[in-house]
Image: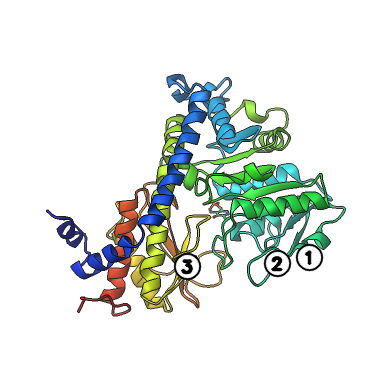
Amino acid sequence: MTLTEQYKRLGVSEAVYAYGERVLASLAGRFAEIDRMAELNQAKVLAAMQENRVDATCFAATTGYGYDDVGREKLELVYANVFHTEKALVRPQIVCGTHALTVALSANLLPGDELLSPVGAPYDTLQEVIGIRPSPCSLAEYGVSYRQVELLPDGGFDYPAIAAAIGEKTKLVTIQRSKGYATRPSFSCEQIGELIRFVKAQKPGVLVMVDNCYGEFVEECEPSDFGADMVVGSLIKNPGGGLAPIGGYICGTAACVDRCAYRLSAPGLGQEVGANLGLLPSFYQGLFLAPTVTAGALKGAVFAANLYERLGFRVVPSAAEPRHDIIQAVELGSEAAMRAFCLGIQQAAPVDSYVTPIPWDMPGYDDPVIMAAGAFVQGSSIELSADGPIRPPYAVYFQGGLTWYHAKLGILLSLQRLVDAGLAMVEGDS
Ligand SMILES: *Cc1c(COP(=O)(O)O)cnc(C)c1O
């Protein structure tokens, strides 16, 4: 079977396939740059494993308290090496990204302290953690106050307002690297570094935490290379390489990470406990694959941006923009188009390909949300997935793909479903 025939078998018409190939032909330079980044990060990860003498003893399962867990300790040394930090906490007991961020914040903020976000509102789930939306056990309940400085209309940092917001009580500054589900730009490590230098010049002792979700291995550096005291993320996104079935990480200064360990387990216990339950092989191997997997997802994002922008849809980031995370937004303009797009992504999945995504009223959201995901790991968004709230501008947020080829198929099928529904047109399709 030829490739065209295989794509046909998977549901992609010759016209859509041919259009995709024309778009791809213009992306050789972009893809070469992504490959170069993957190569750099692969070398970085590999060197970290070699320098820490990773061997088969690291893969043994531990249970119970998990004392003397060599594999767990080495994995944390490997992460610290990759992120160039003094220490790391990498655990399956960190249940998701929000949990990792919660641990980092609550471990390093005490009653009377103030938290500052100089980059506008944080990710949805953090609003309850902080207490922006009242919630039991929020930081607000424990006497931690919060301030927020909005970004400038062009997405830049509002330095005068940030300077004015830093006060006596300001203890920790949180910076979200990825736009998440907002319409602002994502930040490069360089930009984050500039912001860190600024806040530390205002108040030298202030701590800076970066929410690094979706940003790992997209650039050759990480925010920890630019002065962040903590970088935090989820293992079912980029750094788990698609293999980690659960987990989160916090890399940072010894002072900060030690406190995180005490918060996660218990004061006095810290990093000494926490059985690995046999998950370490997937953590190591996932990290090993993460630079390549992230590169595949990035190619998918760039391909989607170019494919849809040429058809007249607004895409964020735009086709030619540099990337700081793996998220791609496509504004589709109608609920019908969102449904068609998500159906295509779902039908491209290796798991649950036969189900039809429909919008539903998700807790915590004002509008129904539609989600397409056919993942090996539930909710894993390093795997090919798309979602969005049903409201203008009817944008879907698209991310992931364990391989570039799978991301490509998903994008082609999303377009195919739009074409089938008469919501988009490519040359040659009737
Ligand atoms: C995904 C994400 C989170 C939360 O991670 P969960 O694993 O969904 O809890 C936080 N911040 C950003 C920017 C994210 O993308």
Measured Cα–Cα span from mark 3 to mark 1: 29 Å
Say what amino acid the circle numbered 1 marks.
Answer: Ala
Badge 3 or badge 1: first in the primary sequence: 1
Q: Nearer the viewer, mark 2 or mark 3?
A: 3
Which numbered marker is on residue 285? none
Asked if marks 3 and 1 touch (Cβ < 8 Å), the reply is no
Measured Cα–Cα span from mark 1 to mark 2: 9 Å
Q: Nearer the viewer, mark 3 or mark 1?
A: 3
Q: Is residue 242 visible?
A: no
Q: Is residue 2 above or below residue 306?
A: above
Q: Position of residue 92 (x, y in %)?
A: 52, 37
Which residue position holds label 3? 318
Badge 1 or badge 2: first in the primary sequence: 2
Which numbered marker is on residue 150? 2
Q: Quadrant of the C terminus?
A: bottom left
Which numbered marker is on residue 161? 1
